[in-house]
Image (spheres, helix red, strand yellow):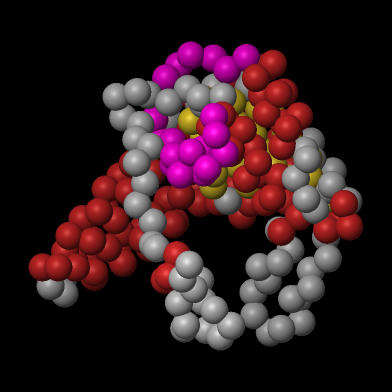
């Protein structure tokens, strides 16, 4: 698949078939993904490919704990958004639909063929924004380049994938379950399987470049 096509047609997959994904395919994806960039070329990423049914169920249960908290807050926000006016009601309805799809995904997570638990060696990270008095966003940079390559690799293979970071909040339990040693952080969970053709979509809507990119100073749209 041509790279730009893959970038523009790679949504989060919420519905999968029960067809297994061969180890050779996942290995091929990881083999290409490992060429992602990382700070100092330290390549601190590590991935646990979880296919054992019992372990998948336990991982899904841990993810569910955080999803239940998240969806309660999100639905409160959707209700408040709907109450304002008709135009915003439509936006709220779309948000509710997204929540429903993600709730379906969470309910069926244990049945997804492969769950990739992406971790990173903390000693390889340079957290350059740690002293700015706000939450850090830089620390995961050397992991998520790799994770994005995994997502694109799945698309190239015709697989569906979905990235979530909720599992990171359950790191102690995940570490105990999967034997993750100290000094390793859980950064992401990627569900991988064959997308349900009746429910999957690839036509995405995103903000135009002029809304997200500026020339020289903030607010001046970058145009070609």
Relative to 163, is 15 above or below? above
Relative to 29, is 80 above or below? below
Q: Is residue 147 magenta?
A: no
Q: Is residue 76 visible?
A: yes
- Magenta span: predominant SS is loop
Give the residue at x 46% y 49%. Answer: 67
Q: Is residue 129 left or right of residue 25?
A: right
Q: Is residue 86 left or right of residue 21?
A: left
Residue in the foreground of this view, choosing between 126 and 174? 126
Q: Quadrant of the N terminus?
A: top right
Residue in the foreground of this view, choosing between 1 and 149? 1
Q: Position of residue 86 (x, y in %)?
A: 10, 68
Q: Is residue 19 magenta?
A: yes
Residue sticking out furthest to the front: 224
Residue sticking out furthest to the left: 86
Q: Is residue 191 visible?
A: no
Give the residue at x 38% y 37%. Answer: 202
Specify start and end residues of the magenta stretch as a single range.
1-22
Q: Position of residue 4 (x, y in %)?
A: 52, 42
Residue in the foreground of this view, choosing between 94 and 25? 25
Task: Using the rendered view, name the quadrant where residue 133 is placed.
Answer: bottom right
Relative to 139, is 184 above or below? above
């Amino acid at each position: 698949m041509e790279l730009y096509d893959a970038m523009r047609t790679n949504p989060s997959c919420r519905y999968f078939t029960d067809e297994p994904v061969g180890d050779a395919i996942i290995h091929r994806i990881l083999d290409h993904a490992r060429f992602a960039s990382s700070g100092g070329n330290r390549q601190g990423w590590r991935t646990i490919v979880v296919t054992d049914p019992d372990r998948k169920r336990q991982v899904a249960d841990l993810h569910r704990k955080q999803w239940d908290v998240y969806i309660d807050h999100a639905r409160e926000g959707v209700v408040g958004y709907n109450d304002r006016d008709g135009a915003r009601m439509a936006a709220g309805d779309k948000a509710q639909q997204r929540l429903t799809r993600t709730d379906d995904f969470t309910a069926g997570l244990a049945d997804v063929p492969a769950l990739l638990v992406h971790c990173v060696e903390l000693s390889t990270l340079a957290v350059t924004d740690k002293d700015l008095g706000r939450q850090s966003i830089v620390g995961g940079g050397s992991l998520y380049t790799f994770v994005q390559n995994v997502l694109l690799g799945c698309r190239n293979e015709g697989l569906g994938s979905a990235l979530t970071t909720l599992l990171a909040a359950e790191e102690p339990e995940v570490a105990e379950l999967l034997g993750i040693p100290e000094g390793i952080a859980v950064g992401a969970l990627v569900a991988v399987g064959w997308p349900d053709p009746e429910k999957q979509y690839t036509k995405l809507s995103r903000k135009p470049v002029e809304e997200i990119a500026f020339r020289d100073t903030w607010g001046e749209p970058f145009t070609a």
